[in-house]
Amino acid sequence: MDLKDILSPGALQPALNATSKKHLMQELSQRAADSYGLDARGAFEALLERERLGSTGMGRGVAIPHARIEGLDRVVGVFARLQKPLDYDAVDGEPVDLVFALFAPGEAGADHLRALARISRSLRDASVCAKVRGAEGATAIYAVLTNPVDSKAA
């Protein structure tokens, strides 16, 4: 699964100013609504519900909040680079500054898991994260995220 299939260029926020985890989820949900026609409130509530099961902060400043949305026809994503790192209850206790929110159809079992694995593989790569953190603007971030990770890692 290619991230170009999941993330549209307009679903990227290169300098999001989120003041709390809840505010971050609201912003991600609104961007998903604007980019893919999702119901912003429903997306927000689904992200919060998933987060209550356990933090989606995977460490090293990265979080991958995700939710299933009934009526969605494919897996879609929203990416945000935060202006300043945010306390997120990540597994390593570090604040988060790179967030890839994933929204999947209610019945998208395998596709949802493949997309999560693909995003996780990319954002576990320290060089990818460094490039995203240093990128100038949304176009550059999109290029870094959608370029295939070294084929040996895939």
Image (tube, helix red, strand yellow):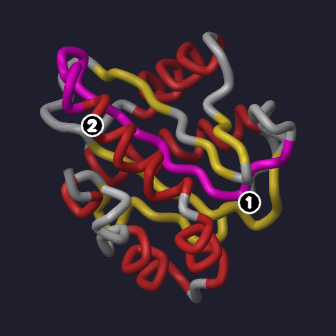
Residue on which the image places disc 1 = 17
Q: Nearer the viewer, mark 2 or mark 1?
A: 2
Secondary element at tag 2: helix
Image position, residue 59 (x, y; %): 71, 44
Residue on which the image places disc 2 = 114
Is 145 one of the magenta-colored residues? Answer: no
- Of residues 44 and 77, the one nearer the viewer is 77
In the figure, is residue 28 to the left or right of 119?
right
Quarter of the image for residue 92 reads top right
Quarter of the image for residue 102 reads top left
Is 96 one of the magenta-colored residues? Answer: yes
State which region is magenta: 94-111
In the figure, is residue 51 to the left or right of 121?
right
In the figure, is residue 70 to the left or right of 47?
left
Q: Mark 1: few, some, or many residues within 10 Å (few <14, many ≥20)?
A: some
Image position, residue 85 (x, y; %): 81, 56
Residue at 83% in and 48% down: 95
Give the Cα separation between the discs numbered 2 and 1. 29 Å
Looking at the rendered structure, the kind of residue marked 2 is: Arg
Image quarter where the C terminus lies is: bottom left
State yes or no: discs 2 and 1 in contact (Cβ < 8 Å).
no
Secondary element at tag 1: loop
